[in-house]
Image: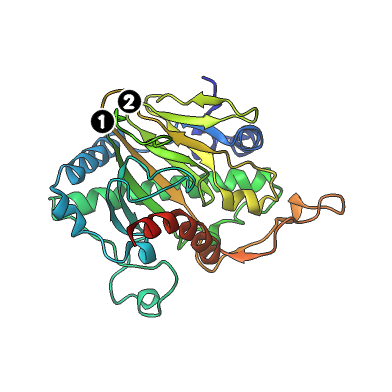
Amino acid sequence: MNLPVIDLAPLLSGEPGGLNQIAGELGHAAREIGFFYVTGHGIDPHLIEQTFAASHAIFALPLDAKMALTRDFFKTNRGYVPMEGEALDPARPSDLKEAFNIGWDLEPDDPRILAGEPFRAVNQWSEIPGWKETLLAYFNAVWSLGRQMHRAIAVDLGAELDFFEDKLDAPLATLRLLHYPPQPENARAGQVGAGTHTDYGNLTLLLPDQVGGLEVRQRDGTWLKAPTLEGAFICNIGDCLMRWSNDTYVSTPHRVVNDSGRERYSIAFFLDPNPDAEVACLPGCQSAERPAKYPPISGADYLRSRLDATYEKVKADRA
C-alpha cells in the first residue's frame, strides 16, 4: 500500500509496549502524509454491514422523503444534504454527492439544546425499522475507537495520556453517510464527487465501499489513489488537530472522483472536539525557536469558521 497500514491491536488489547508502538507509528504517519489505514480496530463486521445497509436504505428513499429529514442544516449540521448541496472546494462547482449527517444524540429537552449551545441539535431520524438504532451503535463504536487513538496521539505529542479525554467526551462529532453517483458525462468543468478539501476536526475515520475514488494530494502536488483495504478504516488528520499540534501533524488535501461507472457509498466519522474545548498549542509542540502559530480558539468557533466557508457558495448560488 502507498499509505501506511497500522494494526491497532497492540494498543486496544493493552499489550505491553503497545501504546508506545502505536504512538510512534501513528505519529510518523501523521507527520509525513496525514493519511493511514488502521486494521485491528475491533469494530464488529456485522455492525459495519448493517450501517452500509442503512446508508443504502436512506438514499433509496424518494427525494421529498429525504428533504423532509433536514431542518436548518446550515445551523445544525444535521439531516439530509441533497445532490450538489455542498461545495467542499468553493472555487469549483458543487459536489456530485448526497449526504446524511447525525451528531451526538441529545433529547429535545437536553439543557445543552435549551441553552442554544453551538452546534447542539436534535438528530433527524428516518422511520426505516432499526435505522436509528444501527446508526447510534455505529456512532458510539467509532467514537470510542477515536478516543482510544487519541491516547496514542497524546503520547506521541508529549502530552498526558488522557489529555484529549475531557475534550472529546461531549464532541461535535459527525457521522456522515455519503452516496456518489457515477461521474456524469455532462459534469461541469472541475466538478467531481467531493472537491479538494481538508477535514475540519481532529481525526476522520472513513469506511469506503469497494468502488474506491478517494485521492490524496501528496506534497509534490501529485494525486495518490487510496483504494479500499478490506476490513480497514482510512484515517486522516484534520485541521483542528494540526492546529493543536502547531502544524507538527499535517492535514492533507483530498478529493473523491468516482470514475468507476458505479454507485459509490462511504461512511465517514469526523471526530471534532467539545464545543468549549480550548484548542491551543500543546506545550510539547512549541519552543523559543518554534513558537505557537495560532491563538487559542474554542472547538465550536473553529468548526463554525470552517462550515461557514463550505456552505457560503451554495447559499449564494441559491439566493
Residue density around tag 1, few if under 14, some if 14–19, many if 20 or more, within 10 Å: some
**Residue 13 seen from this side:** no
At x 83%, y 52%, the residue is 287
At x 39%, y 43%, the residue is 268
| Sequence-earlier tag: 1 or 2 | 2
Identify which amino acid the numbered label 2 is placed on.
Answer: Val
At x 24%, y 48%, the residue is 134
Residue of label 2: 211
**Residue 209 seen from this side:** yes
User: Up-down: is 219 above or below 78?
Assistant: above
Q: Position of residue 108 (x, y in %)?
A: 28, 73
Q: Which mark is residue 87?
A: none
Q: Nearer the viewer, residue 131 or 263?
A: 263
Name the element at disc 2. Answer: loop
> Does the CB distance between marks 1 and 2 fall below 8 Å?
yes
Label 1 to label 2: alpha-carbon separation = 8 Å
At x 43%, y 55%, the residue is 313
User: Up-down: is 150 above or below 103?
Assistant: above
**What is the quadrant of the C terminus in the image?**
bottom left
Q: Position of residue 285 (x, y in %)?
A: 74, 50
Q: Nearer the viewer, residue 66 or 152?
A: 66
Q: Position of residue 255 (x, y in %)?
A: 46, 36
Q: Which of the colour schemes (rainbow, by chain, secondary structure, one colour) is used?
A: rainbow
Identify which amino acid the numbered label 1 is placed on.
Answer: Glu
On the picture, is 178 further left or further right than 279? Answer: left
Residue density around tag 2, few if under 14, some if 14–19, many if 20 or more, within 10 Å: some
Q: Nearer the viewer, mark 1 or mark 2?
A: 1
On the picture, is 21 further left or further right than 38? Answer: right
Report which quarter residue 123 is drawn in: bottom left
Q: Position of residue 135 (x, y in %)?
A: 27, 49
Residue of label 1: 263
